[in-house]
Image: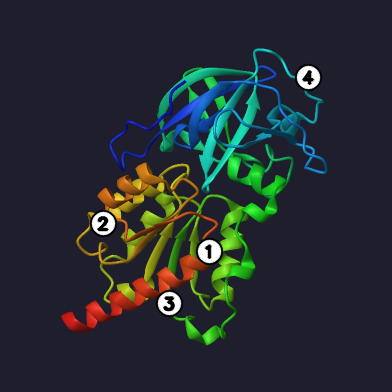
Amino acid sequence: MAETSILLESGTNEIEIMEFTIYGELYGINVAKVKEIMMSAHVKPIPHSDSAVEGIFKPRDIMLTVVDLPFYLTGRTTTPQEKDLFIITNFNKMNIAFRVHTVVGIRRISWADIRKPDKTLNSGKEEGIATGIAQCGTDLVTILDFEKIVAEIAPETGIQLDEVKQVPEEVRKNESIIFAEDSLLLSRMVEQSLNKAGYHNIKKFNNGQEAWNYLESIRNDSDLSEKAALIITDIEMPQMDGHHLTKLVKSDEKLKKIPLIIFSSLINEEMERKGRELGADEQLSKPEIGHLVSIMDELIERRKKDETVRS
């Protein structure tokens, strides 16, 4: 299968999901994360690696880590089959292969039709490994949180709090940050990082729709810049994704001056182009938490200078 790309108009609040099966159950992955599909091949084991890591293989000029997704999801010992496939992914600037049993196809749906699983489906835990449940025709498809899977297997690949310098609380405490992120784990990690950097006034929202509702409620306030100094948004979120949120903000005469950063695992050349078209001020990959803080400082300072000049 050739490399894939999402052929959608930017900011439509739609997603293309690649459906695949493991032991007959339907799962999904955002097509934007998929580089290609390959027939499975011999994998060289790596000693002392995580039990869900099969090993490595080198299909062409790049070495890929292979994650045994059937084992990760079920705990059942995997017997590789000749018809198994590898989904080659790219997110957070990493290339990783995931073993699956079959690939069913691709469907295009609205983020508004995707629901976040509740704690019942997550075995009572605060957050499971499903980023959403999608109704695709007569089928229910579990969209997996591949970022969380990789972060559990290899924590060093995720957000690192030690990249952020500790500063006194009063340095940035008055700057009100609007933050839209559906992952509780990532939301908590980003909040801890920003708190360490001195940003303590953070208003968190579970998706773009909730963030947009809040922004609409304050758009006519005289102290708008104090209530929303800067917006940080993920891309993949149920109800409303970050691209659609960006489009709404940057199309609004009163809100468009608020600096907006897209902070997502999906940042690549194609996604950067889409983000620029929609008016995003900056776009960063999620592990770049230290860089995020410096960009926030720069954008907030630039906005203050612009407001001073206008006044």
How many other residues sit within 10 Å of disc 4, few (<14), some (14-19) or many (≥20)? few
Q: Amino acid at mark 3?
A: Glu
* Mark 4 touches mark 1? (CB < 8 Å): no
Q: Amino acid at mark 1?
A: Ile
Q: Is residue 282 above or below residue 102?
A: below
Residue 264 visible in the picture: yes
Q: Where residue 305 is drawn, which disc sits there? A: none
Mark 1 or 2, which is nearer the eye? 1
Under circle 3, the secondary element is loop
Residue toward you, 149 or 25: 149
Residue toward you, 49 or 69: 49
Query: How far apart are the alpha carbons under marks 1 and 2?
Result: 24 Å
Mark 4 or 2, which is nearer the eye? 4
Q: Amino acid at mark 2?
A: Lys
Query: How far apart are the alpha carbons under marks 4 and 2?
Result: 51 Å
Measuring from the top left, give residue 206's x and y in whole percent: 51, 52
Question: Which residue is at 71% across, 45% downward?
Answer: 153
Q: Where residue 175 is drawn, which disc sits there? A: 3
How many other residues sit within 10 Å of disc 3, few (<14), some (14-19) or many (≥20)? many
Question: Which residue is at 49% across, 69% downward?
Answer: 202
What residue is disc 1 on? Answer: 289
Q: Where residue 79 is drawn, which disc sits there? A: 4
Who comes first in sequence, dot 1 or dot 2?
2
Under circle 1, the secondary element is helix
Residue toward you, 83 or 170: 83
Looking at the image, residue 13 sits to the left or right of residue 166; the answer is: left
Question: Which residue is at 47% across, 65% downward?
Answer: 292
What residue is disc 2 on? Answer: 250
Residue 79 falls in which quadrant of the image?
top right
